[in-house]
Amino acid sequence: MNEIINNILTRRSIRVFKEEQIPESDLNIILEAATFAPTGMNAQSWHFTAIHSKEKLAELNSLVQKVLVTHPGADPGMPYIDFLKNMAEAPNFNFFYHAPTLVIATNSINSASAAPQSDCTAALQNIFLAAHSLGIGSCWIHLLVLISDLPEIKDHLTALGVPLDHKIYGSAALGFPGRSNPKPSPRKSGVITIVK
């Protein structure tokens, strides 16, 4: 089978990671792959903030947990807040599954691209596939998208390098898999139409 097709068909979301950090050289390759994703109007207005530090990730996780647990809840502007609060109350809460690296994909709020969210989504897919090709596990992390406008979170992410005029569209947890790849879920039928 073609190597690229095989990579696509065998990649799975990993939610158990080894503590071992991925090599910086591999991270650089993964991030370069992200920048070669398609982007509307070739705007390339995205930014990728890679947190490659166990201590910085622990600080971020602690802040996210604190902010969620102390949030008053029942917020119409944040329909998932009560669900997130319940998650954060777990003593072992870790929103990126204890992965040793987290890549945050953002795009400028003034992007010339007509589809900044799609640009970041395509880039994240490149990240997932590049990581898998290097034997590195990955998982889409969406939580920061939902809470990034909360002042404490925004200030902390800005201090980590997320551009102030950017919106978060997704994140990728990266690390060596802590267990073998899960089996794929059965693919749903009836989702393809070919018009001839």
Image: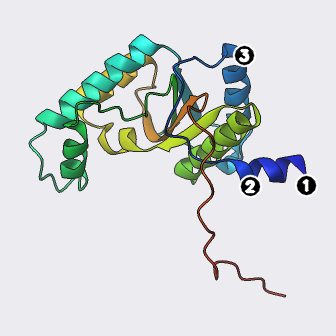
The answer to whether residue 74 shows anywhere in this view is yes
Label 1 packing within 10 angstroms: few (<14), some (14-19), many (20+): few
At 78% from the left and 83% from the top, the residue drawn is 194
Q: Residue furthest right?
A: 1
The front one of 176 and 29 is 176
Q: Residue furthest front?
A: 179
What's the distance in space between the residues labelled 1 and 3, CA to CA? 28 Å
The answer to whether residue 35 shows anywhere in this view is no
User: Nearer the N terminus, badge 1 or badge 3?
Assistant: 1
Q: Residue furthest bottom?
A: 196
Q: In what quadrant of the picture does the C terminus appear?
A: bottom right
What's the distance in space between the residues labelled 2 and 3, CA to CA? 25 Å
User: Which of the labelled discs sits on residue 9, or is there none?
Assistant: 2
User: Which of the labelled discs sits on residue 25, or is there none?
Assistant: 3
* Above or below, comparing residue 85 to residue 56 in the picture: below
List x then y, in percent, for residue 175. 58, 27
The front one of 45 and 4 is 4
Tell me which amino acid carries mark 2: Leu
Q: In what quadrant of the picture does the N terminus appear?
A: bottom right
Q: Which residue is the site of mark 1?
A: 1
SS class, disc 3: helix
Label 2 packing within 10 angstroms: few (<14), some (14-19), many (20+): few
- The image quadrant of residue 133 is top right
At 75% from the left and 31% from the top, the residue drawn is 134
User: Nearer the N terminus, badge 1 or badge 2?
Assistant: 1
At 45% from the left and 25% from the top, the residue drawn is 162
List x then y, in percent, for residue 80. 25, 53
